[in-house]
Image (cartoon, rainbow, N blue to C red):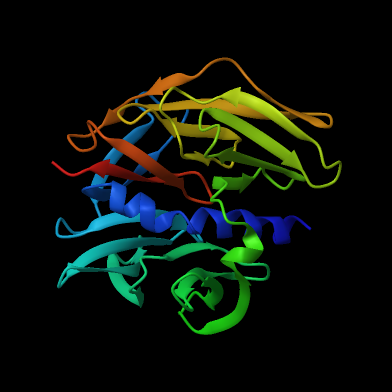
Amino acid sequence: MNRVLKIVFTCCCLLTLSLNVLARQSSTLFLGKLDLRAKPPITELSQVSTDLAIADEPYFFDRTHLYFTQVFEAQNDQQATVFVWDTSAKTIRSIIRSNESGAAASDLPKQSGLLVIRQKDKDSPELRALDKNAKPESYLLYRSQAGTTQTWINAYQFEKSPWFLYVENQQKNQLKAYNTRSKNTIVVAQLPKGSEYFSVSSTGHVIASDGSQLYQRQVIAKGEHLQAAAEWKAMAIDSPFCKSGVSKTAISRYGDMIAILCDSE
């Protein structure tokens, strides 16, 4: 059940990808070290994406592979390409190109892979699953099956619990949680004003941005409930990069690296 919900959440998130990419005029992806116990917690940022494209959708599949998209302008058309950055070998390769700007990395039910929106016809985009090498795996669902509105902005399973943290586009500043076992939905916390996207570390820390500053706050499981501990704390970035316009983040599986999208200067 948890895996099925992960696909449903991601599907609806992906349906908003084209709008999100178009809305962001220019963004660059950086990769840095993360240590939430240190001051500052984010250090050694280095640029991953090119200045000639709009970066989006960073996602770690494992400790050494970071997937992300870049949108390139091509004859008044936009093409989104999914890239893989090998953090160990410091190499990059492209694995799939989509004219619909609807390719993004995410968990699949049985393995790591990609969820890609393909335009079946003018009004019916469809969601397909590809493996991490861009080989077709399965057809998942049409947009009409997921609903006509883009409800979910992003969602994460909280550790290995039945809880999923998520944000809705109607209530962008509310961090909610849905329990697949009890079917209960709760409000965990208010996100920092202006936040839409968040990421979760292996220690249960939620990282969100108000568009300029990063903040972190720990969420803990207490019995059958989730609750936010303390208050939001600002996160300093020890780098000349990403001083403004911070939007999305992604945290590696071991919590030692963080990918950050920032407005290009």
Q: Which residue is drawn at 72% across and 48% down?
A: 160
Q: Give percent across and percent down for residue 173.
A: 51, 28
Judged left or right of residue 183, residue 264 is left
Judged left or right of residue 160, residue 254 is left
Q: Give percent across and percent down for residue 132.
A: 49, 74
Residue 257 appears in the picture as rendered:
no
Q: Quadrant of the N terminus?
A: bottom right
Residue 129 position by quadrant: bottom right
Q: Which residue lies furthest to the top in this view?
A: 230
Q: Give percent across and percent down for residue 175.
A: 59, 31
Q: Quadrant of the C terminus?
A: top left
Q: Residue at x 61, y 80 (%)?
A: 138
In the depicted structure, whether residue 67 falls above or below residue 210: below
Q: Which residue is drawn at 79% across and 47% down?
A: 180
In the depicted structure, whether residue 81 falls above or below residue 184: below
Q: Which of 188 and 143 is in front in this view?
A: 143
Residue 249 position by quadrant: top left
Q: Which of 8 and 240 is in front in this view?
A: 8
Q: Give percent across and percent down for residue 261.
A: 31, 45
Judged left or right of residue 224, residue 113 is left
In the depicted structure, whether residue 141 falls above or below residue 27: below
Residue 81 appears in the picture as rendered:
yes
